[in-house]
Image: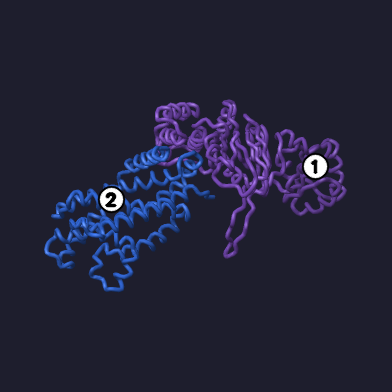
Chain colours: A purple, B blue
Amino acid sequence: MIETRGLRKSFMSRQGREKKTVEAVRGVDLDVAEGEIFGFLGPNGAGKTTTLRMLATLIEPDGGTATIAGADLRRDPGEVRRRIGYVAQGGSTWDDSTAREELVLQSRLYGASKASAQARAARVLEGFQLSEYADRKCKTYSGGQRRRVDIALGIIHEPKVVFLDEPTTGLDPQSRAHMWDEIRRLRAEGMTVFITTHYLDEADALCDRISIMDNGEIVASGTPASLKREISGDVVRVALAVDTIAAAAEALENYKIETYDDSVRLFVEDGATAIPQILRALDAAGVPLGAIELHRPSLDDVFLTKTGRSLRES
Amino acid sequence: MKLLRDTSLIFQRQIQLLLRNPVWIFVGVFQPVMYLLLFAPLLKPALQVGSNAEAYEIFVPGLLVLLAIFGGLFQGFGLIAELRAGVIERSRVTPVSRLALLLGRSLRDVVSLIAQAVIITLLALIFDLRVFIGNLLLAYLMLALISLMTSALSYGVALVVKSEDALAPLMNTVAQPVLLLSGILLPLTYAPGWLQGIADWNPFSWAVDGTRALFRGDLGAPAVWQGLIIMAVLAAAAVGWAAREFARSVR
């Protein structure tokens, strides 16, 4: 449904007097299958939004190719526009308009007649459980309601693919769960959904497949489960006092280790047998230890092994 | 066809939002009425003309051109609010004509300006202003072209600078010399030669002369067709440029 090869974009950025070229996206290859929820996971500034905006025809790529829903992005952006929906991160509704007016207008901008636009708006309002507020001004909506109107605007023309940029950022947990249900519903209706997120749990729970992006490049792709499987074994986290981190790192130098301000993480083959050995090593080095815990690798660990940084920190 | 349809869609929405907030009518008319009531009475002695009607013949067209210029130049603020709300981006992902995104908005500005102009003309009638209807309609055409140009210009600049903080001083800087060099408040016939020489390079000064000629009933004055042509060419150029800014990729 979406295929990109070597998609690139750089921007001129001005820092004081100096002009600098920032490579926001440095050659992205993507293959998104029909009917899946595909997630773009990465820290802020990784290039997710820039990639999405290129795919949505809002900015022109510097290089590379892309085919979206059968239309060529570079040669026929107009046709791409007809086949996709795009929902920006910052919202898209006007305070003094009502949801129904916005939906009817958007549908008509896609070419629908007045009657069919009204019918579609009514149907979509129903689908997103917005009928009750449909004729109130957008400024009276809650954050979650307004976000649902945004998504409704993005799919009013029944696109084959819809791009959602950080659809749950800024929502409270309940609205977030609601939004996940809406996104799954879009998939059930046959749409291919492409989301960006910097939430690990969202990528894990919602997406069928993900690509992890960092610094303008894709560093890993696959299903959340397969990505986690790539990191063999378990993760052991040992909580420590701040001034003992260095000593602990030295005592555990035979392990694959990441150090943090208040803890270390060890990547081991088998947690159950490794824990006693770790305890002995720390004991021998005279390092007093706090809590010790064992867990299966998370997507954050995947990110950590690929980039050397934790997604939580960046 | 598609352009017409898209333009009318954008225009209808903009008009609908405008009518929903009728404060603009009050604000838009209050200031010019103050000019009519509080400034115009100074004109008869100042311009050394025989009657109020004559003074209004000179002043009212200038006032209307002033409204067209300023009204247009400050429309960009609304667009920046729309940019911020994401409304423009939402339109740009649809196949809607980019020219229509501009024209729909600029036409709303033209319509609201003409509405203002009609109200002011009617009020001026009370003060003995008399204009032949055909001439008046041509004068409105001039105003429409001015307003189309300045609002398109303002939208284009708004899309480039994307911030009110930059737009406000920029537009004021443009508007002030334009205002002073167009003979809007007082005719430039009183100006020294060098000032008139500079003013000849100000396209709005031609528009003011043309509009005054029309209010005077002097349809045959060259300033009429000269002003109309200059304004039409500049309006077309401004619309073309601003529509390209709508189409251009903005980050």
| Residue B10 rendering spot, x and y as whole percentages | 40, 41
Choose top left, top right, bottom left or bottom right for residue A160.
top right
Left or right: A196 as drawn, with respect to B96? right
| Residue B224 rendering spot, x and y as whole percentages | 25, 57
Q: Mark on residue B218?
A: none
Decide: few, some or many residues near mark 1? Use Cα within 10 Å; few <14, some 14-19, many ≥20. Answer: many
Residue at the image point whose x is 39% and y is 63% from the top: B173
| Residue B1 rendering spot, x and y as whole percentages | 40, 37
Q: Tell which subunit mark 1 falls on.
A: A
Residue at the image point whose x is 75% and y is 50% from the top: A241
Task: Give the foreground label among 2 and 1.
Answer: 2
Q: Can residue B69 be seen at all in this image of the molecule?
A: no
**Mark 1 lies on residue:** A267
* Disc 2, SS: helix
Amino acid type at image mark 2: Leu
Q: Mark on residue B141?
A: 2
Q: Tell which subunit mark 2 falls on.
A: B
* In the foreground, A296 or A105: A105
